[in-house]
Image (cartoon, rainbow, N blue to C red):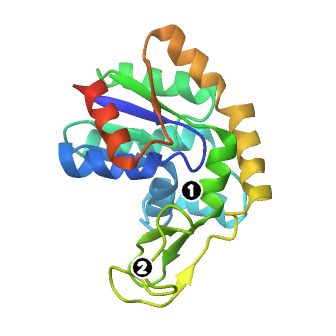
Amino acid sequence: MNIILLGPPGAGKGTQARHLVETRGMVQLSTGDMLREAKSSGTKLGQKVAAIMDTGKLVTDEIVIGLIEEKLTSESGAGFIFDGFPRTLAQADALAALLAKLGQSLHTVVEMRVDDDALVKRITGRFTCGDCGEVYHDDINPTAKAGICDKCGGTEMTRRGDDNEVSLRTRLMEYYKKTSPLIGYYYAKGDLRPVNGLADITEVQKSIEAILG
């Protein structure tokens, strides 16, 4: 079973992907993780990625597809989760061609729908324990004691530099310009299944489980 998690930044794709990895034994394919892994791998393709990234340039779709092919042919599991890819219609076509080449198919595309204003409120209020990585929120999930992690007792709380309204709305606009056309693309193919991305994490998990069967 191969699936795509589609949705704007902050919709919770990574969280839901990790849940599917833990409960179903699927393999998460995150473009960012694959590029970082390739850069330090020392392989021929990895050296190519490192050379491009070190100059600050964007890695081409061809290289990303090459990395995905490596993963699809070298790793095994109950299926693959594409997280952060495809981002454009051209990438969607390239992924479809790759899956066909390997004799595989796409099971479904889960669209995690959100309301922009609610998403901005959710993202701008989140902070993380610098010691254990536990995630909190000013309003929804604050620490029991201010400045102290409930999980490990750490006191180093951090916030991402781009978790502010201006940066987030810029990222959302980029998503709508480049990635949202994929919604129509996969809807026309009959692959799209929407869920409420702003629901409680457990509710989102149940919705996705119901879709996957």
Q: Secondary structure at mark 1?
A: helix
Q: Quadrant of residue 135?
A: bottom left
To which residue does mark 2 refer?
144
Residue 98 against residue 35 in the figure, above or below = above
Q: Nearer the viewer, residue 91 or 78?
A: 78
Element at badge 2?
loop
Q: Horizontal and vertical percent for residue 131?
A: 42, 85
Does 130 sit left or right of 2 as displayed? right
Please indicate whether residue 53 sits to the left or right of residue 92 in the image.
right
At label 2, counting other C-alpha atoms closer than 10 Å, the crowd grade (few under 14, some 14-19, many 20 or more) is few
Q: Residue at x 50, y 61 (%)?
A: 140
Point out which mark residue 48 bears: 1
Residue depicted at 26% across the width and 49% down the height: 21
Q: Quadrant of residue 82?
A: top left
The one nearer the camera, 187 or 12, is 12
Which amino acid lies under the numbered mark 1 shown in the image of this protein? Lys
